[in-house]
Image (spheres, grey):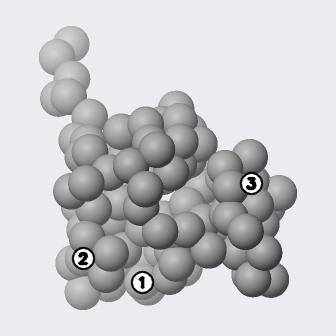
């Protein structure tokens, strides 16, 4: 069987006003995340799928992120199979942080990647 390559983008290609789906767990999110990102941990993803379809309802591209790219690759593959325009962010939050892209926390503390 031939599989299409997983669509992915470099962190520099993610627009700051784009739809970012963060699939990391709650403790990882609390340490630091992309401002305005939609947080649905991979462990809750199937049950909360409707939240994503509502956010992406207008056909917006979904930029999927985790710590390094493994979990987000699995979610991206699932979304593409559902007909959603989704891309995996290469290198995840580690690459995002390494590129100096902005991160926030919910409590105003210094953000870091857990």
Q: Are marks 2 and 1 in contact (CB under 8 Å)?
A: yes
Residue at 68 percent across and 55 percent down: it is: 112
* Cα distance between the residues tagged 3 and 1: 22 Å
Q: Secondary structure at mark 1?
A: helix
Label 2: state its secondary structure: loop
How many residues crowd mark 3 within 10 Å: few (<14), some (14–19), many (20+)? some
> Nearest the camera: 61 or 107?
107
* Number of the label disc, if any, that sits on residue 60: 2
Comes first in the chain, label 3 or label 1? 3
Label 2 vs 3, first from the N-terminus: 3
Q: Quadrant of residue 12?
A: bottom left
Which is nearer the eye, 103 or 2?
Answer: 103
The residue that disc 1 covers is: 55
Badge 1 crowding class, 10 Å Cα cut-off, few under 14, some 14 to 19, many 20 or more, is some
Image position of 92 with respect to 52: above or below = above
Q: Position of residue 62 (x, y in %)?
A: 33, 65
Does the CB distance between marks 2 and 3 fall below 8 Å?
no
The residue drawn where x is 26% and y is 34% is 6
- Look at the picture and state if 72 lies above or below 36: above
């Amino acid at each position: 069987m031939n599989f299409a390559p997983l669509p992915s983008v470099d962190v520099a290609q993610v627009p700051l006003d784009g739809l970012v789906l963060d699939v990391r767990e709650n403790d990882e999110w609390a340490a630091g995340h992309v401002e305005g990102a939609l947080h649905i941990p991979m462990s809750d993803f199937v049950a909360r799928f409707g939240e994503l379809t509502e956010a992406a309802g207008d056909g917006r591209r979904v930029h999927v992120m985790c710590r390094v790219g493994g979990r987000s690759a699995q979610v991206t593959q699932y979304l593409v199979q559902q007909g959603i325009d989704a891309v995996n962010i290469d290198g995840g939050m580690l690459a995002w942080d390494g590129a100096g892209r902005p991160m926030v926390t919910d409590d105003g503390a210094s953000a870091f990647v857990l």
